[in-house]
Amino acid sequence: MSFLTKVETLLKTIYGVEYTEDYKSEINKLAKKWMKKEWKETSHLTEKNVYLITYGDIIKEEGQPALRTLNRFINEYAKNEITDIHLLPMFPYTSDDGFSVVDYRQIHPKLGDWADIEQMAEDYRLMFDFVANHMSKSSKWFQGYLKDDPKYKNFFIPKEDDFDASKVVRPRTSPLYHEYGGKTAWTTFSEDQVDVNFKHFPVLLEMTDILLEYAFRGGTSIRLDAIGFMWKESGTSCIHLPQTHAIIQLWREILMELELNTLLITETNVPHNENISYFGDGQNEAHMVYQFSLPPLVLHTLTTHNASKLTKWAKTIGKVSDKATYFNFLASHDGIGMRPTEGILTEEERSALAEKVLENGGRVSYKSNPDGTESPYELNINYMDALINKEEDVSEDIIVEKMLAAHSILFSVMGVPAIYYHSLLGSGNDYEGIEASGINRRINREKFEYEDLISQLEVSTRRQKVFSGIKKIIRTRQKETAFSPFADQDILELGEQVFSLIRQNKETDETVLFIVNTAKEKIEVKLPLEGYDLWSKEFVEGNVELAPYQFMWIKK
């Protein structure tokens, strides 16, 4: 099927009877415009790829644009470990720490400019955040909408009496619509974050152009933020609609036509089966989806010292295709989502995690259920603090070992690993941030002075031990083709306290057995194969004794 035939089919899926031939010709014209550019070649994903999730301004240095300081820090302290940098929204914004974008095409002045982005792209593959679902009420687009500017008058979604919104699913309790000086607009997330109207074809065209500009400027990966809410249809849930999937497929089709290795990564913090629907058929939609079930399940495992639920779930995770895989993470700028554990953990198990988070100084956001009860929706806490069991984890060394055990799981399971900057840097809860802002998520968004951070990383502190330990995990993993994002995975059952799997790369004939003790005491395990432990550099076979939270990577 030709490119234009595929485009036409997808546009008809999106717009139905509203579709006209002009839509196809406009998309084709846009693709040809970008085809004439001189594109930088990008590499494919391998076992070497490790993403760092970070804000552009996490490290401050007097007189320096924040992006230059960040680039300098990674170059000096993590260049051998980090290959890809996920820059959280780097654009001018008015709220939500960047997710209320004023202008998609400008860099926030405190970060620097596009030249700083291009410099960083010389050293690393970059992932840009595309906040495509909504933008700031202060944006030129929305201000034009309010003023009845002909260009923007249909760029947003007014409240209409005949639109049935009774089934709409969303993660907020704020009003679905807000009023702005006599005009109304749909707001999935907040009064300052106004949803754009993809039913208006010029919006899709403009957004597609922005996506291609990001790819051209060094975005080898594009994170599609809150993408599930993009299409609104009366009488439906307005989440995961067929038109949304078709838009992502259209974007992938254009990227393929331009022969780009740019990766589309969908962010949908929802139950597992809904989440992985964004793979499409494994060849035609997202290249990666966020593995949202992993963070709460690893936390549950190391809290209860029982890996049964993690093992059972992991058995359902198989190879998607040679072009699509999972984006694995434990922590991010948001909290630990609990909806992805629906159908995996019981209500009692979910509530136990929420109670633990509160005991450890974190915060919990709840969602209302139809029967009037409430369930934990999101846990806001630094991941290392979330892992601590107060009565058991009595020494700093145990806490560090537990953190490294959690990340050994992250770096072993099928997919591409991504590590949040506070996890890499061994941080704890930022109580000052949450108290000053009143925003729960700020507990895990602390920023640093350059010299202060360096001094903490150069002495034997918890921060330094976690930083050096995780870097060693990364370096060890990057040498083994068995950890290719597309290598096979076989989940083993070696006891309730053990999480174990085998990764096998059939192309290179390399096999690695991973085994981690999730218990607080020593255990003995019978190994299913013998080999060289890449971590301890010793040959192991038969029965082995694992210390609390010890892990092995045994190369066959």
Image (cartoon, helix red, strand yellow):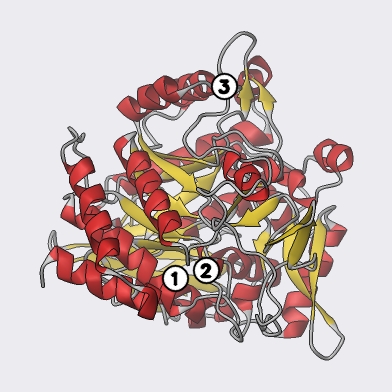
Which label is found at residue 66? 3
Q: Which amino acid does label 2 sit on?
A: Gly
Can residue 522 be seen here? no
Quadrant of the snapshot with the C terminus: bottom left
Residue contact at pointers 1 and 3, CB within 8 angstroms: no
Residue at label 1? 244
Give SS at disc 1: helix
Residue 147 relative to residue 219: left or right: right
> In the rendered image of this protein, does residue 134 appear above or below residue 431?
below
Q: How far apart are marks 1 and 2 (CA)?
A: 7 Å
Give SS at disc 2: helix
Give SS at disc 3: helix
Q: Which amino acid does label 1 sit on?
A: Thr
Judged by depth in the image, the label closer to the viewer, 1 or 2, is 1
Residue most toward the bottom? 371
Judged by depth in the image, the label closer to the viewer, 3 or 2, is 2
Q: Distance between the residues labelled 1 and 3?
A: 35 Å
Residue at label 2? 228
- Between 437 and 312, the one nearer to me in the picture: 437
